[in-house]
Every structure is written in structure tokens, then in C-alpha cells.
Image: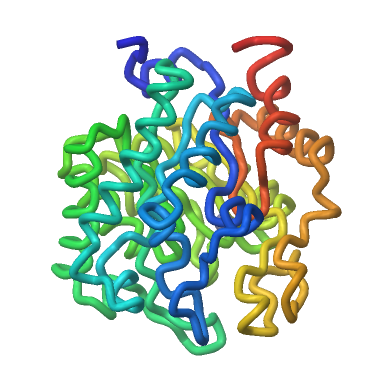
Amino acid sequence: MARPPILDRLDEGQSLLLDGGTGSELQRRGVDVLVGANDGLEAWSATANIEFADVVQQVHQDYLRVGADIITSNNFWTAPTRLERCGLGGEWRRYARAAAENALTARDNLNPAAYVAGGIAAATLQGPPESSPVSDTRQMGREACYREWSEHARLLVEAGVDLIQAEYVGFIEDCVTAVDACSEAGATVFLGVRHIRPDGTMQYGERLEDLVEALEERAVGAILLMCSNPEAISAGLPWLRRAFSGPVGAYPNLGYNPTGPILNLPMLSNQKASTGPDILQNAEYYPSRVAEFALNWKRMGTQIIGGCCASGPEHISAMRPVVKGNGAT
Ligand SMILES: [Zn+2]
């Protein structure tokens, strides 16, 4: 096998190019990611893993073609609590396994040296910040929340992913639950922290240095700031770098309003309310500008760089020479 352990490469100081968004890219390519959605995202792109497996594989392939070292399986919401919202909770293992297989097949066919991250997202049961949200850990109870993460992670590890990317986690308490549960599955765990605020704090005002303290002695391989405005990631990274001695990463949300057709609400400060067609609002984050952010993040010591919502192969392609050096593969 052509892949050394990913943490060895990061320990050596290498920089790795992560893929871009998958759910938004599927939506851009005509896949219905709003199955069963009335007032929220329900299971989002989870059902595409079976209903549109060919398109999911094409997205993975396109990221590999532009040089991604890591692709993320489309397991964002294949967790039972989210698939249950489409009446498919009992089928979650089938969708979760299909997501892993789509990514592994694409990788094996196109670039066996690339890594597949099993990308599990937090259940995200809380409402918007103004509703005084509580963590998934509290809403589900720690035992049930832990079990959902650990069963999902174990399934993906058994399917053959190289690492687990526990992502879209908003509360420190949920980060701890996710890291503990996923590391029990025996894989390297990357943690992706969502919706960093313009002042560099976490979504609900918790501090990144408190997150790092809570994770001390825990098996977290890397911490990444994700699904946040590029500017907010720039604000959060220095705090994270000061507090955390391990590798850090960044993958921004470039402006995506997936619920535009059903809700006329913005979700992040770089999004506008949308009544439909403009689900991708990334015009101001054109590829070469995103590459400038990537260069800045790399200079801050960030080793894993890619994109989240509304980023596509064109952004990853533009970031490639910055992240990996000119012409490097
Ligand atoms: Zn995102």
C-alpha cells in the first residue's frame, strides 16, 4: 500500500491538500440534497450515496484529479438520528457503508496514494443560536450520543477508511464526546470545528483554547476549523495554533445556502437570504482569492487545507500550488 500513516507525514512537516465541498457540489450537479426537507436540512446529501452513487463518485474523482491528498467520504449525515428524519433511520448502515465505498472506489481507481477520511458530522440537534441551544451530548444524553459516533466510526473503519474526520462539531462538550467515541474505533481522528465567529471564538462563544484544554490527553490527531467564513478562520487559527501543539487545518465555507428553496434565511455572515436559485453565493471567493487565504493560513503553520460548502474542484485546484508547492504532487 502506497500510503504511510497520515500523522507521520504531518509530523515530518508536510502540507496536505484536502478536498472541497461534497454536498454543495452534488447540489450544483443537480442532485436533490433536500430529501424530506421542510424546515431544515434533514439528512441533506446522505441519500445520494445510494440514489446518485455515480455522481458522488464523480465528485470524489474530480477532487483527486486536481490533486487532493485527502478525500472525505459523504457520510456527513448518514447518522441514524439524521436519516430518521427521512424515515430511513433503520437503514443508516446501508447509506453509511455506501458513502465509504463511493470514496474508496474513487480513490482506488484514481490515486491509491490518497487518503480517505470517513467524514462523520455532529447530529446538530440544536436550533439557531438565538434559541439558547444545548449540545447534542446533553440533548441525546452522553451515552446515546457517544454510541452514535462510535458505531458510525467503527462501521467506516471496518469499511477501510484511513482516518475519521469528526466534523461540523459546535460545542466543546460534543467535541470531547466525538473524539472519545471515534478514537475507540481505532483510527486516527481529525476534529473539524464548525462556524467559527469573526472574533475567532467557536459558534456559541466558547474559546478555542478551552477546547484544546478539554481535549488534553485525548487522541485527537489534528484540529481543523471548517464551514466558517474564510475571514473567521483567519481569526481563529492563531488562537488554535497557540494552544494546540499538533497539526491544524482549515476548510472554509465560501457561501452556501442549501435551504434557499425552502427557507429564506442566511446561515453564515457571508451568506444572503435566498429564495431559490442562488444556493451558491461564492462569487466574492473566487479561486485565486481563496488561494490567497490558503497561503496566509499556510504561513500561520496550517498543514491541512481544503474547502467546505460552496467550494469546488476549481478552488482546490487553485490552492494546490500554494499548499503543496509549485508542481508538487
Ligand atoms: Zn460546510
Residue drawn at the location 46% of the way across and 49% of the way down: 192
Q: Quadrant of residue 147?
A: bottom left
Q: Residue 197, relative to residue 141: is it above or below?
A: above
Rendered image coloring scheme: rainbow
Q: Residue furthest bottom?
A: 131
Q: Quadrant of the C terminus?
A: top right
Q: Quadrant of residue 100?
A: top left
Q: Residue 1, relative to residue 211: is it above or below?
A: above
Residue drawn at the location 29% of the way across and 62% of the way down: 79
Which sits in the foreground, 287 or 323? 287
| Residue 35 x, y percent position in the rendering | 46, 73
Answer whether residue 210 is visible to the viewer in this image: no
| Residue 77 x, y percent position in the rendering | 38, 61
Q: Quadrant of the N terminus?
A: top left
Residue drawn at the location 23% of the way across and 55% of the way down: 94
Counting labels gives 0
Which sits in the foreground, 50 or 43? 50
Answer whether residue 225 is visible to the viewer in this image: yes
| Residue 60 x, y percent position in the rendering | 51, 37
Residue drawn at the location 39% of the way across and 52% of the way down: 49
- Quadrant of ligand 1: it is bottom right
| Residue 90 x, y percent position in the rendering | 18, 69
Q: Residue 234, relative to residue 36: is it above or below?
A: above
Q: Quadrant of residue 173?
A: bottom left
